[in-house]
Image (spheres, helix red, strand yellow):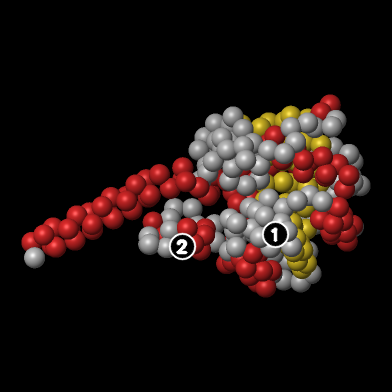
Amino acid sequence: MNYLINTLIALVLIYIFFLFVIFIFQRNLLYHPSVNNYLKDNDLKKPDEIQKVEITTKDQLKLVAWFYKKNLKTKKTILFFHGNAGSLENRTYKLNSFKNLNVNYLIVAWRGFSGNQGKPYEKGLYEDAESAVRWLKNEGVLEENIILYGESLGTAVAIEIGQNKKYAGIILESPFTSMINMGKKYYPFAPVSFLLKDKFESYKKVSKIFFPILIIHGKVDKIVPYEMGRKIYELSNDPKFFYTQEYGDHMVEYDEKLLSELNNFIKSLN
């Protein structure tokens, strides 16, 4: 009996220690600035047309960003928020495609990413995004001419800053309902709701977006369940559009069909 009691106590202590480790290092599990698994094309076709700019946050961090300007007065501007891994260079294959969509764009690297100072956390990312909006406005871009584009984790940021605003539109690529639900998927044995610091509860906020929304999700997404994208769509207001890429994984393929969908959505905003 003593053996069983001691074993049970040991297992409980191990479990508590495990939860403690997860709690302390959870942001290391969530944010991966050095991971380059999304790298597809490191060659910007016209690098001279892309300006490397610096965006200052309210907490005085300097964020690196890339700005492509076609015509700020007559063309929409995509404000791109990347996911939880990699650098700006990892998205060059998408940026090359944006050039063919007849838009301007600004892609900003989060704090702690692409050589930026600071450490990423939920409210910090929201401030980074708001700082990017302020920077565009200082360049003369009107709010109603900005298209928010969120990729994976960036979808939660786009939804957060899009609430009750008048942006031109919002594009969500591989969105999730909340980080709590994602945590329960990967750590079903842990009290995620209690432990999680950065909750990113998009499902509570998306109904507060009142401008056109396009959701893109790969049917074979191995990271964010396809059903989460469908749920975000169900909770969204009209006009809303959902594009399923039957063979798409978490990072969807930027093929002709998807680019056509993006092009049609952007044209509908004019």
* Residue most extreme to the top: 48
Nearest to the observer: residue 63 or residue 214: 214
The answer to whether 5 appears left or right of 268 in the picture is left
Residue to which mark 2 is pinned: 184
Quarter of the C terminus within the rendering: bottom right
Quick one: label 2, few (<14), some, or many (20+) residues within 10 Å?
some
Whether residue 232 can be seen here: no
Nearest to the observer: residue 231 or residue 77: 231
Q: Position of residue 130 (x, y in %)?
A: 65, 46
Looking at the rendered structure, the kind of residue marked 2 is Lys
Residue at 43% x, 48% y is 26
Looking at the rendered image, the disc whose residue lies closer to the viewer, 2 or 1, is 1
* Residue most extreme to the left: 2
Image quarter for residue 191?
bottom left
The answer to whether 195 appears left or right of 35 in the picture is left
Residue to which mark 1 is pinned: 218
Give SS at disc 1. Answer: strand
Q: Position of residue 196 (x, y in %)?
A: 43, 55
Q: Position of residue 137 (x, y in %)?
A: 76, 43
Q: Would you place residue 131 above or below residue 12 in this image?
A: above
Looking at the rendered structure, the kind of residue marked 1 is Gly
Measured in 3D between alpha carbons, the distance from the residue under mark 2 to the one under mark 1, in whole angstroms, is 21 Å
Residue at 86% x, 41% y is 99
Q: Position of residue 71 (x, y in %)?
A: 90, 41
Nearest to the observer: residue 261 or residue 77: 261
Quick one: label 1, few (<14), some, or many (20+) residues within 10 Å?
many
Residue at 66% x, 42% y is 38
